[in-house]
Image (cartoon, rainbow, N blue to C red):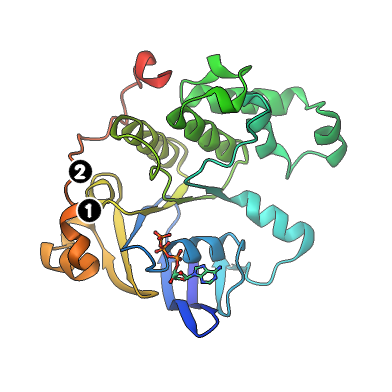
Amino acid sequence: MLVIEGLTRRFGDKEAVSNVDLQIGAGAFVGVIGRSGAGKSTLLRMINRLQDPSSGRILHDGRDVTALKGRALRAWRAEAAMIFQQFNLVGRLDVLTNVLMGRLATAPAWRALTKSWSAEDRAIALSALDQFDIAPLAAQRADSLSGGQQQRVAIARALAQEPALILADEPIASLDPRNTRIVMDALLRINKHFGITVLCNLHSLDLARTYCDRLVGMAQGRVVFDGAPAALTEQVAHDLYGLEAGEVMDLPVAKPAFGGAIPQSAALA
Ligand SMILES: Nc1ncnc2c1ncn2[C@@H]1O[C@H](COP(=O)(O)OP(=O)(O)OP(=O)(O)O)[C@@H](O)[C@H]1O
């Protein structure tokens, strides 16, 4: 269980996140929604401790992770894996090495420096690639892949970290509709097949409604909605997004494909 208590982050006079309280049970798929500037990224970055809170606490399974430092902080960052809009792969390295980077928190530093990964680490990394039908791309340079493939590599790297949580910050913002669907299906698979809790910032309300079991709506740093997708009425959506409401509700989305295999042609496109 992830518990957030009174979490606040100020930048100068501005409160990007204001006194947020949340409890997120293990295995949930939570969509964090709201218009640009609502505080979604800052919230996720504080949970991973990429950004320090101004006040408040973050507890995971009863352990306070708010003030962790050094090795304990690195271990927490591996446990709360981040996925970014821009993938954050090392472009000149091959796909497998990028995924092996997810093993760094558990591997001794000399292994990473000498690139002599253990057989177990390699097996975990290959298996993670295989989950998303991209194992055939293992030897290719990361920067030769399409955006959708790169994001799946980033998700495989996160899975190789053996995380308790995945924090995905607008993971599909730079993808076309087809790759959007493939990447959201990959996150759904991580959640349903591996039972890993997913918190996903999404601008599109339709995607959030389609994939998430729970929606947390933010406006001006505060949580203004917290409930099941079905409970988010059109009126609440309009209040949350204002003039952007039409734009975020327009994207046609088919049902998620979890349970069925991703077709190879689509997976490798
Ligand atoms: N490092 C920073 N320095 C100053 N202000 C910041 C910083 N990071 C975020 N902010 C401000 O905090 C507010 C919340 O930003 P945040 O990126 O968390 O929102 P968001 O909902 O994720 O929006 P977006 O979808 O555009 O990323 C914004 O007003 C933003 O300008």
Q: Amino acid at mark 2?
A: Leu
Residue plotted at (64% across, 54% down): 77
Residue 1 visible, this angle: no
Q: Answer with the quarter of the image where residue 186 lies.
A: top left
Q: Secondary structure at mark 2?
A: loop
In the rendered image, residue 115, in percent from the top left (x then y), is placed at 81, 28
Count of residue discs: 2
* Residue, disc 2: 251
Query: How many other residues sit within 10 Å of disc 2, few (<14), some (14-19) or many (≥20)?
Result: few
* Residue, disc 1: 248
Q: Residue furthest bottom?
A: 13
In the rendered image, residue 22, in percent from the top left (x then y), is placed at 41, 70
Q: Nearer the viewer, residue 128 or 23?
A: 128
Q: Is residue 113 left or right of residue 203?
A: right
- The quadrant of the rendering that contains the C terminus is top left
Residue plotted at (54% across, 31% down): 153
Residue 102 visible, this angle: yes
